[in-house]
Amino acid sequence: MAAADRQRPPFVAMLRDSALAAVVAALLAVPLLGVRLVDNASGLTLDRRLPLVLYAAAAVFAGRLLLSLAGRYLAPSLRGMTASLPGMPRNSLVIFGWVLVAAALLLPWMPFAERNLIDKLTLILIYVMLGWGLNIVVGLAGLLDLGYVAFYAIGAYAYALLSMHFGLSFWICLPLAGLIAAMFGIALGFPVLRLRGDYLAIVTLGFGEIIRVVLLNWQAVTNGPNGITGIERPTLFGLSFSRAADGPTFAGFFGIEYAPAQRVYFLYYLILALAMLTTLFAQRIRRLPTGRAWEALREDEIACRSLGMNPVTVKLSAFAIGASFAGLAGSFFATRQGFISPESFSFIESATILAIVVLGGMGSQIGIVLAAVLLVGLPEWFRDLAEYRMLVFGGAMVLIMLWRPQGLLSRREPTVLLDPKPASAEATVP
Amino acid sequence: MLTVEGLSAGYGRIEALNGIDLEVRSGEIMSLVGANGAGKTTLLMTVCGAPLRTAGRILFDGEDITGLPMHEIVRRGLGHVPEGRRIFPRMTVLENLRMGGYAADPKNFPSDLEKVLTLFPQLKQRLGQRGGTLSGGEQQMLAIGRALIGRPRMLLLDEPSLGLAPLIALQLFQAIVAINRDEKLTVLLIEQNAYQALKLADRACIMVNGRITLHGTGAELLADPAVQAAYLEGAA
């Protein structure tokens, strides 16, 4: 694995490589940047902009050269840094995980924790939860699902509609939304049972779009593109978080002064609890026959059949359980925003969640947290950079794939241990 | 124990099995020997519920299992070690074995595991290792061990010697004989390695072009000049 035995081009080859890239860039830049139609008095004229083409080519030349140089002189040391990650003993990851949980619990009490930060963390936690939920389908069961956002949308609309029409409270709707999403998961699962890999991905992608288009066009029920407004806010055992309400308020009950931030903190703890529920469930079920069956099915379907496993029920259970967590996250999203519309559930959401799972390292719970912070947090914090933030986002993804193509953390923990002593001895052997 | 009556099967218009009659008796090892493409694996897959059958029926322990899905057949006690081992490469050896007990009572697992590890002691040191890192012979042992965890009453083995060194293959065949003897497990063995397969078999069949052309005891077939000429050139 030493970097030295990888063949690196010498400087001349780098220059030639960069020149080639510049030529390609110039060719692309001619139609993209080099010509412009101008509408003036005598009609349309073609405006040639040669300097722009040259600038683009020069920028690509320099960038390519820098990248080659960085690859030669920086990458080995970076690789050395990151290579130590997967070799970390099993316990240190677990400890790191609990430290993260403790930090998340204590964070709102820290002096630097202002409302804005908590709000952003809440958003990140939604994606952490979605990532953990999708990880059940993609990471454990190996079913590539590109339409996961559909279940998120179903959960959100389920809560919004149930609360609007039947006046049900958030706490009753939450499990119902999970259940409804799970039913849709099974409904999607049935037709795609025989599909795998890319074919499955295409069908799930289509399913995601169908849900979005239905939400957009079924005016009578979903109010179409205008969305649903005034969705009821959640309460803590009946205590409302508003200044004045019909029932008792949180501030009034505890005899403290009302502050709008109280709801923000409450929502933060709520999504933290929901996300923890997701990950604890996922970790537990991996050690149960159902979860182990998902992993086995991902590895080899024929072997699974030969061991008496019915792939139909195993796949459907993965779809249903994965979908139910998206449903829970969806109803949280609806209650947090107070407003939902089909716009929030476009394909890019599915892609982001899948990117979080893949970049985090399939099946790794902590890797997903890191990836969610990176993919959701970064664009939020770099909002000031306006359009450049997507550039940073794309760059971060490319860098991760270059340095850690298997994801940030990608160790798989065994789910059965014979007895603790020899197992821990084995775990230290890479 | 396993009765196949007039079984025909094919892939589209290509006929792979042509009226196969086969009877495996309780407690015996039956070997099915044939060249590449004779239809051995097709026969096994069809017995296990692959939807290739065009005629005939399959009885297991007197019950008609024709057309049942594979997992139902396996749950009735007809274990199956598929061709090419098909272990779970990213899961540990212990997890692989645990999956073998998927359809069985989890209470039996510790004692069944003990039995498998006595049969294949090599697996003992490998329990925490990922399946994909095992050698070919160890993977085959794992595949057989995994099927045994489910406590089958009969085991179908599809070319266990595939791609293995002769010495390792011999070791596996000895293990198969030991299971048959100690556990009274009925075995249907499908093999290209005709000499070994005939030597350990109580009874055997030769398959050519989707038909069974010869059958008898293993010793009879070993002594048959036609079998010797076709399958045993240079063997032993």
Image (spheres, coloured by chain):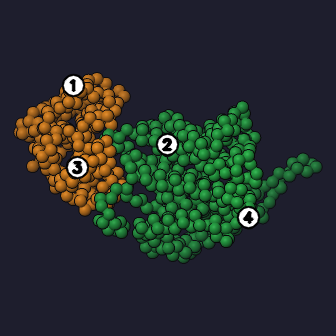
Vertical side of A66 occupied by B100: above or below:
above
Separation of residues labelled 2 and 1 (CA atoms): 40 Å
Q: Is residue B35 above or below residue B142?
A: above
Amino acid tagged 4: Leu
Which of the two discs, 4 and 2, sits closer to the camera? 2
Q: Are marks 4 and 1 on the same chain?
A: no
- Looking at the rendered structure, the secondary structure element under dot 1 is strand
- Image mark for residue B5: 1
Residue at mark 3 shares a chain with residue at mark 4? no
Q: Chain of mark 3?
A: B
Q: Are marks 2 and 1 on the same chain?
A: no
Residue at point 35% right, 40% down? A309
Residue A87 is drawn in which quadrant?
Answer: bottom left
Please tell me whether mark 1 or mark 3 is closer to you in this view: 3
| Type of the residue with mark 3 | Asp
Work out whether residue B233 can be spotted.
no
Judge left or right: residue A236 versus residue B3.
right
Alpha-carbon distance for marks 4 and 2? 38 Å
Q: Chain of mark 1?
A: B
